[in-house]
Image (spheres, helix red, strand yellow):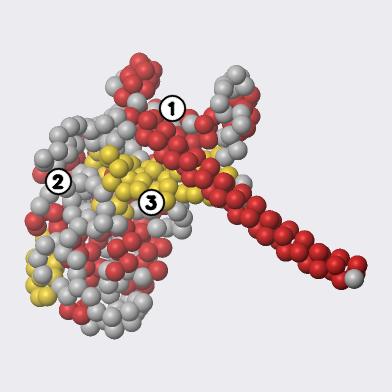
Amino acid sequence: MVLSAVAILAVFVADMHENTSTAFAVATSQRDRLQAEYMAKSAVNLTRLLVGVEPQIRQTLAPMFQMMVGRAPPQIPVWQMATEILMPFCNMERANDAGTSMGMDFGTAQGFEDNPATCEIQAIAENSMINVNDPLARDGDQARRGNAMQLFALMGGYASPSPYDPLFERPDADGRTTSRLDVVSAVIDWWDQDSQRTIFDPGAATVDVAGAEDDVYSSFPDPYRIKNAPYDSIEELRLIRGVGDDFWSTFIQLRPDDPTARTVTIYGSGAVNANSAPPEVLLARLCSFIEGVSLCSNPLEAAKFVQLITTIRSLIPIPLFTRSADFLTFLEGGGGARDLYPSILAMLGPDNPLLFTPIAIPQDQRREITRSFLTGASILYIEATGFAGRSQVRIKTIVNFHNRWTPPPPNAGSMPTLGILHHYRVD
């Protein structure tokens, strides 16, 4: 009887232990997830606050910038340094280590010492990428033409031969061969209002319409219709004919789970930020206007341009151009980094292979090209990740800081300091 009682009690104890352990693990996981989520929310809001006070930061740095480059500073990309600036809020242990090496002491800070969670922040300007959506600043054929030229340049259409040619010569995921011009037309037809197919002529830089834009999609095994409205997310591009995994990893998201490697956006007016856009995006935007120059037709010159911009940005962590006109002057062999940072040129030498051959900007296109580049940003992508225990929560947001934004009628008001959320997602 004793042995039977012990055996029965052992079963009860084991079952109770298992239930208690499971409940404890679930409670711990829920606690960690809640801490991680609110750490990510705090990181997003702190980044919004940092961007909101950027004008005051710029005003503080103005005398130093004026002394260095002889002109007023452009917008300071504080969002790119959010993790470092907000480190005491995100990771006090790491902040203490960094502060010790710089002679700073965060030990007197209160309210951070018992925080079990940490966070990481990545923020990028949406106008540092090529806009594939209906541009805000243009309408009709002008909007379609601008998008078509940028997309065609991004896919290497103005280079002959192009290293991307094989991608458009083999069947895609739908078993069809889709050319560059097919993809360009399909991307534009998704957001334009008509039901006719867009025809882009890269030689004449003109757009026209002919035929029905739904023909290809209606022949799919699971047919669907074109949206004929602006994109609501980048993922909608997956529905475009010819946009498969190979196309995505080559032109859309070069590295998975790295937002800084994205080359296109659906938020923007079509103008590209010359201070923060990747050199490849700057080239694609430039070559959509003047494809015959050496930077667009000679891969070696393009590689020199990419390497020079990358090198200068790594050596001088401040914006290169105060105005968009500075970027054009830089392309022509003067101004921009060539005059603002003579020490770099002295270090590289006038005959250094990094220096590309200057180009000539056509005067009849200069004004339009100047309007196609910016030196500031007003719409930002902020990705904050909170960590607590084994839990990880990621928040992805699109925040509008444009100072001329006003709410649609019948609402009233103006842009708040922390901006307006266009998109908010918790993973």
Look at the image and tell me whether residue 423 can be seen: yes
**Quick one: 102 or 403, which is closer to the camera?**
403
* Residue designated by label 2: 137
Horizontal side of residue 344 vs 280, given as left or right = right
**Three-letter residue code for mark 1:** Ser
Query: Which quarter of the rendered picture does the C terminus lie within?
Result: bottom left
Of the numbered discs 2 and 3, the one sitting upstream in the chain is 2
Secondary structure under the numbered disc 1 in the rendered image? helix
The three-letter amino acid code for the residue at tag 3 is Arg
Measuring from the top left, give residue 181's x and y in whole percent. Answer: 22, 68
Above/below status of 209 relative to 64: below
Residue 186 image point, x, y percent: 21, 68
Disc 3 marks which residue?
425
Residue, disc 1: 343
Q: Residue at x 67, y 60 (%)?
A: 19
At 29% from the left and 29% from the top, the residue drawn is 417
**Position in image of residue 134 (x %, y %):** 18, 54
Near mark 3 (Cα within 10 A), the count class, few <14, some 14-19 or many ≥20, is few
C-alpha gap between disc 1 and disc 3: 45 Å
